[in-house]
Amino acid sequence: MAARPDKPLHLHILSMPSHLPVVRAAVEKLCQQLGFSAETAGKIILSVDEALTNIIRHAYDEKPDKPIEVELTPLCDAIQIVLRDYGRPVDPSVIRSRDLNDLRPGGLGVHIMTCCMDRIEYRPVEDGAGTVLTMTKRLPKKNHEE
């Protein structure tokens, strides 16, 4: 049996949708190694995918050559995912999902992330270039449902 990962995994990608499957695969593998169920791993992967899509769309206006840093950190009882962009900064106080009664495609990424993850924190970067998003999902307690 492979040893449980205990160091962060760093990925540096460009703001291209074609890079997202690589990140999804890395998140999936780490979730498996940490003991998350397939269902919970799927929710974590979906959250990361939504967050990266939002970065590509909103921070970078869909420009395909902009840097995104991804850090996947195994904690003793959780996984922490940090996404760092260098695009248009976002004011965390204005980040909201659109009304769920507004039936149309798109705009639910923040809602999905909030429902799937235990903790989400947006932090503007001190020099004003970009945003850091930290998402955390705890492992379930032993002998309990997720």
Image (spheres, rainbow, N blue to C red):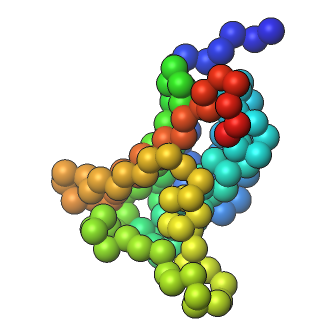
**Residue 125 placement (x, y as % from top left):** 25, 52
**Residue 99 higher or lower than 16, as above or below:** below
Residue at position x 42%, y 68% in the image: 59
Q: Is residue 119 left or right of residue 14?
A: left
Residue at position x 66%, y 63% in the image: 17
**Quarter holding residue 33:** top right
Seen from this angle, which residue lies furthest left? 127
**Residue 70 higher or lower than 94, as above or below:** above
**Residue 87 placement (x, y as % from top left):** 37, 64
Of 14 and 4, the residue lying toward us: 4
Seen from this angle, which residue lies furthest front? 144
Of 137 and 54, the residue lying toward us: 137
**Residue 44 placement (x, y as % from top left):** 63, 47
Quadrant occupied by the N terminus: top right
**Residue 2 placement (x, y as % from top left):** 75, 11
Quadrant occupied by the C terminus: top right
Of 90 and 87, the residue lying toward us: 90
Whether residue 72 is visible, yes or no, is no
**Residue 144 higher or lower than 146, as above or below:** above
